[in-house]
Image (cartoon, coloured by chain):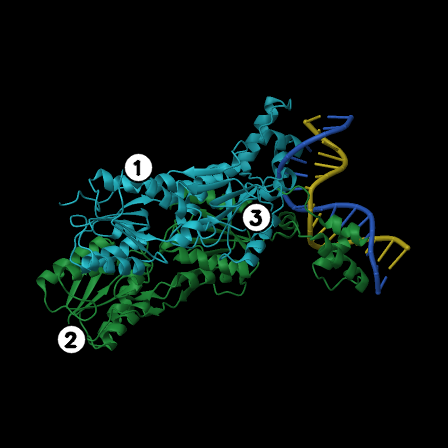
Chain colours: A green, B cyan, C blue, D yellow
DNA sequence: CTGTTAGCGCGTTCAC
DNA sequence: GTGAACGCGCTAACAG
């Protein structure tokens, strides 16, 4: 686009030296025996002209483009997991890199296209991300390619970043238990299908395992378990409403995600029950919704931003473990937990 | 990254021709008098080897990188305006382009860095976007650069994409009027500061102008106007609650955005009023929230995706008007409007 | 010691 | 149909 960018040749000419000398000096090479004066002349010339190297031309030689491909199903454009890309963008910027963002909608044909599009542009590596954590099929990528799986896992590409759902599940139970809840705790939204199928979710199984482990270790049992085939507000509303019609002893809801909890709030309101004095609610994800509810929803957060950040740091770290990297899930305490009334 | 990509030289060698011939044939040049057989040999060789041109190397010569810089304050990572980038990504993909996405957090220093980062990579143009439409200061960009302002306007860069808020404002009033509302309509959230200051908002002034024009043309007047200094759910809740305590004749709320409406719903529920039978509600934006409310909120949508798409199409269209391009705001009818009871 | 020449990386384009 | 130069910057080998 810009017609007449300043080139290395311009700088060299102005400094009265060769482009080779200018290149070495500007790249700070110490093995080079160029005079202090030459350094000064080149640096001055570059500054005066406002020289900036052409990254594309440089990459042709060095095979480093300071550019990373970020390929996802719908991460960038979904309201839900945008923290992933936010963290990635920020970490990349701090490392002097830039992100080529592509979305595939989860369609394999577009995944292949996306991979080729970024490889055509000589990226330094590829982040492969998904909105909802799961085992992911990925089209073939040349073996030498530097790949990190974000919120996903894949046999061929062992470096991955995932939330630490096992600890997160335990934390949710601990929040209720520490408030004094022992009886009347209902689980809203478990789903055996999803929990067992890594291709549906790489993490829900861990989440529920953490919950059950912590319950068992504390000698607690759920008073009810409502399963849902999906996790939208409507489902939370439906199952909670029917639960409350049958049972008057429910004192706490442990919802599998915030959207279910959102629906549960509506059902509790319909039954004239107040959160948290009649019923405590705790949940997962820290969806934006959680902060809009009245009272605010206490939730175990998906650390999307930290995950996005970690994915870039791992991609650029050549000493990384070729393994899963689990990111802690922060507890966001708002106002939806209270000791049981009775 | 990938070590041994197939190069044009490989293709030429296999076809038994020069790279010059191979290049011209693969680029479909017709001014070239190369034999049909040469065409076949080159195309076959390319296909067999799976040749893909190195976009960076090509760009060095052609000054076309098929890459566009998308620089925004927080668009990509905010849940609110992510449709902008979604539309842009999709339109770019369809045009064979790719987006280099950068975020600045609205900080001028980072804006300058972002501009340099994308220019260093020889992008074909730059989209400059913001989450909330407004007049935008932009650091200097070389004059030859192809720039489109997205959801923003700027004197130096006349090509811009904005929502058609004037028509949108009129549409909101029309929705209430068509349902039979004439009295007891309250405006929630007008704000003279914002309406007059293009650097706060390039569009709210248009939105309110559309509303007032349509009201006037129909001989309608607001029964009340509640102003808010900000447009979060809490503000909608507060002003609606106090309004309802004073007035019993309110039959419809025209909220300046969905987040205010979200708060208004909560206030109506607190007062025991039902939407839409006691009070109709109409609003703007089509925030994700609008679909979660019960009943669903009827709203005049910000056409984020269409805007993002338009920004790319304009950037790539050399016959474009150097002007503002207004994108229609679709009406999303859900269940929050009903004829007045009395 | 101080610096240069020439060639490369990959694909496009012009003159012959 | 081709050789050679070019776009821009890096680097190995070489010269004063």
Q: Have a look at marks 3 and 2 and say if they share a chain.
A: yes
Position of residue B27 measured from the top left corner of the image (x, y, whole percent)? 58, 31
Residue A195, relative to residue B313: is it above or below? below
Where does residue A56 sit, x and y in percent of width and height? 62, 48
Q: In this view, does A123 lie to the left or right of A111?
A: right
Q: Nearer the viewer, mark 1 or mark 3?
A: 1
Kindly identify which numbered label has been placed on residue A122: 3
Which chain is mark 1 on?
B
Find numbered disc 1 in the image and state the secondary structure of the residue it sits on: helix
* Between A146 and B317, the one nearer to me in the picture: B317
Q: Where is residue A21 shown, x and y percent of the image?
A: 77, 55
Residue shown at the point (34%, 40%) measured from the top left: B213
Camera sees residue B338? yes
Q: Residues within 10 Å of mark 3 (few under 14, many from 20)?
A: many
Compute the Cα span from label 1 to label 3: 59 Å
Viewer-nearest residue: A142 or A90 = A90
Disc 2: host chain = A
Q: Quadrant of the C terminus of chain B?
A: top left
Name which residue lies at 39% across and 48% down.
B204
The disc label shown at residue A341, or none: 2
Sequence-wise, the earlier of marks 3 and 2 is 3
**Pointer 1: what residue?**
B217
**Which x, y percent locates residue A331?**
33, 70
Left or right position of B265 against A330: left
| Label 3 SS | loop
Q: How far apart are marks 1 and 2 (CA)?
A: 57 Å
Q: How many angstroms separate mark 3 from mark 2 (CA)?
A: 62 Å
Classify B22 as above or below B59. Answer: above
């Amino acid at each position: 686009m810009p017609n007449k960018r300043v080139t290395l040749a311009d700088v060299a000419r102005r400094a009265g030296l060769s482009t080779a000398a200018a290149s070495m000096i500007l790249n700070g090479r110490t093995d080079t025996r160029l005079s202090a004066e030459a350094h000064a002349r080149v640096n001055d010339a570059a500054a005066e002209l406002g020289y900036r190297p052409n990254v594309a031309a440089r990459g042709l030689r060095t095979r480093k483009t300071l550019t990373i491909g970020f390929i996802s199903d719908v991460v960038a454009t979904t309201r839900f997991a945008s923290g992933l890309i936010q963290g990635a963008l920020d970490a990349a910027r701090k490392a002097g890199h830039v992100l080529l963002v592509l979305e595939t909608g989860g369609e394999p044909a577009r995944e292949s296209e996306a991979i080729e599009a970024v490889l055509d542009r000589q990226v330094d590596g590829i982040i492969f991300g998904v909105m909802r954590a799961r085992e992911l099929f990925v089209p073939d990528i040349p073996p030498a390619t530097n790949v990190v799986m974000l919120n996903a896992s894949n046999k061929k590409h062992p470096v991955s970043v995932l939330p630490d759902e096992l600890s997160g599940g335990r934390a949710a139970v601990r929040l209720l238990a520490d408030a004094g809840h022992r009886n009347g705790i209902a689980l809203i939204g478990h789903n055996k299908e999803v929990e067992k199928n890594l291709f549906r979710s790489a993490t829900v199984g861990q989440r529920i395992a953490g919950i059950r482990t912590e319950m068992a270790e504390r000698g607690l049992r759920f008073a009810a378990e409502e399963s849902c085939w999906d996790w939208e507000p409507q489902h939370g509303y439906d199952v909670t409403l029917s639960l409350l019609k049958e049972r008057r002893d429910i004192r706490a809801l442990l919802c599998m995600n915030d959207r279910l909890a959102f629906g549960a709030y509506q059902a509790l309101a319909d039954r004239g029950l107040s959160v948290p004095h009649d019923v405590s609610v705790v949940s997962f994800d820290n969806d934006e919704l959680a902060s809009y509810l009245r009272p605010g929803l206490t939730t175990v957060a998906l650390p999307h931003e930290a995950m996005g950040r970690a994915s870039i740091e791992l991609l650029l770290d050549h000493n990384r473990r070729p393994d899963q990297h689990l990111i802690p899930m922060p507890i966001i305490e708002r106002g939806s937990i209270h000791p049981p009334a009775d």
